[in-house]
Amino acid sequence: MGAGHSHKLYRHGHSPVHALPPHCKLAAVFCFVLAVVATPREAMWAFGLYALLLAGVAALARLSPGFLLRRLLIEVPFVAFAVLMPFVAEGERITVLGLSLSESGLWSAWNILAKGTLGVAASVLLAATTELRSVLLGLQRLRMPPLLVQIASFMIRYGDVIADEMRRMRIARESRGFTARGPAQWGVLAKSAGALFIRSYERGERVHLAMVSRGYAGAMPVIDEATATRAQWSYAAALPATALAVCLLGWTLV
Amino acid sequence: MTTPSLEISGLAYAYPDGHQALFGVDLTVDRGERVALLGPNGAGKTTLVLHLNGILDAGAGSVRVAGLPVVKANFPEIRRRVGIVFQDPDDQLFMPTVREDVAFGPAASGMRGQELEDRVRTALEQVGMAAYADRPPHHLSFGQRRRVAVATVLAMRPEILVLDEPSSNLDPASRRELADILRSLDVTVLMVTHDLPYAAELCPRSVVLSEGVIAADGATKELLSDDALMARHRLELPFGFDPSKI
């Protein structure tokens, strides 16, 4: 496995988490998120336990906390929305540090923040321990509609090709003295975007031609099949099973 | 006398907009031959290629591949027999890894398991790319991608290998490597090109497609030495290239 070979979200490693079959991990993350979302927001301790569970998985996968926290920054725009809630929501108001805040708004903000962060953290863990290619195989195995899997796999294959085309167009523009300074130049950028769309569309036609030439008749042939043993399934199930127990406990103790 | 790999007779085609590209093409390529299809831009070379596996539907005339007519009922077998290597390897290599791309053709015809693995490995070995099986295509050099593109059709064990401008965008070393690979293959080759020295190097026989008909057919060396013929069909040798010295 050479350098610069896999996607930047992925962290190469040989931990037990890396070794799990992709569809087990996908199912585990999905069920974990369901359990988190189903937990009552008042059971604050439950979310602490969830965070501990994820930290445990991260430790097993030998991912550093710094790496995870940096990846979690993607959530920031959504946090901004959650922060607004206590100011704009209706209902009883309480005073915190001299600010009048809505109590239900505070609860909603906490709800979004806690559940969102846990969901993002679980996805970051999945992405860091599973190659994109395997994620697709896993989705295929979990019976995601084949057309969607095909679209996603072409997106991965051609993302770089199209980004490169975009870069060449930018260089060509700038080589002829173009700089985007303001709305006056948006017309040129819009035309570039249009040209890129047409080029990509035509490439799509050529790719389809190449596929048909090699016997494509509407369905992708199965080349790799992801398989999992019972032991791997039960290993992967540990996370969502524990989360489910915490969730049920949350409902009974509130 | 074995059945020729490719028999084209009276092939004519007009695009839906009415533009006629082919006006009755006749061409026979025997098994094991390497033939260059020469012609200026717009001569109808690519249009002709797309008839060989039924992507375009002939307006008149017929195409047979190893005796099998190119008609809809035969498409799966025809597409296995005719291996087209397109000009841009990024169009040809559409799967996430080299191995899966090479496996695509055989897998589409129902091959699975160990047999498929063997087929993929053999095809990659034929082009010297076996060490790159698990790489994504976009991390390879252009020359490597072109070689993998050749492997993707070799994996289907084609009757005839059709190459569209195989030397375009290759640096001299990649160009030579590809030539060595093509020479080492035991397969019929139809090579579409306007790289005349490359045609002279690889193909003993050439045909000139001009304005939708086969305008000349003969030994490559003789065609390239015929200045009047060359000038008539907008074919020009690169500066300093002398076909009589091959």
Image: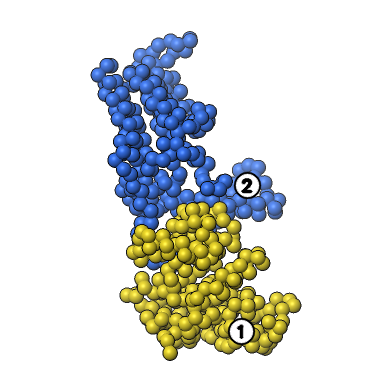
Chain colours: A blue, B yellow
Residue at the location (47% across, 68% down)?
B154
Q: Do the residues at discs 2 and 1 belong to one chain?
A: no
Residue at the location (55% across, 48% down)?
A2
Amino acid residing under circle 1: Thr
Residue at the location (52% across, 31% down)?
A67
Looking at the image, which is closer to me, A178 or B228? B228
Q: Residues within 10 Å of mark 2 (few under 14, many from 20)?
A: few
Residue identifier under label 1: B220
Looking at the image, which is closer to me, B68 or A193? B68
* Chain for numbered disc 1: B
Tell me where residue B43 appears, x and y as whole percent.
Answer: 56, 78
Residue at the location (59% across, 71% down)?
B180
* Chain for numbered disc 2: A
Residue identifier under label 2: A185
C-alpha gap between disc 2 and disc 1: 53 Å
Rendered-image quadrant of the C terminus of chain A: top left
In the drawing, does residue B70 fall left or right of residue B243?
Answer: left
Tell me where residue A115 appears, x and y as whole percent.
Answer: 38, 27
Q: Residue furthest right?
A: B240
Tell me where residue B159 appears, x and y as whole percent.
Answer: 44, 76
Amino acid residing under circle 2: Gln
Can residue A177 be seen by looking at this rendering?
Answer: yes
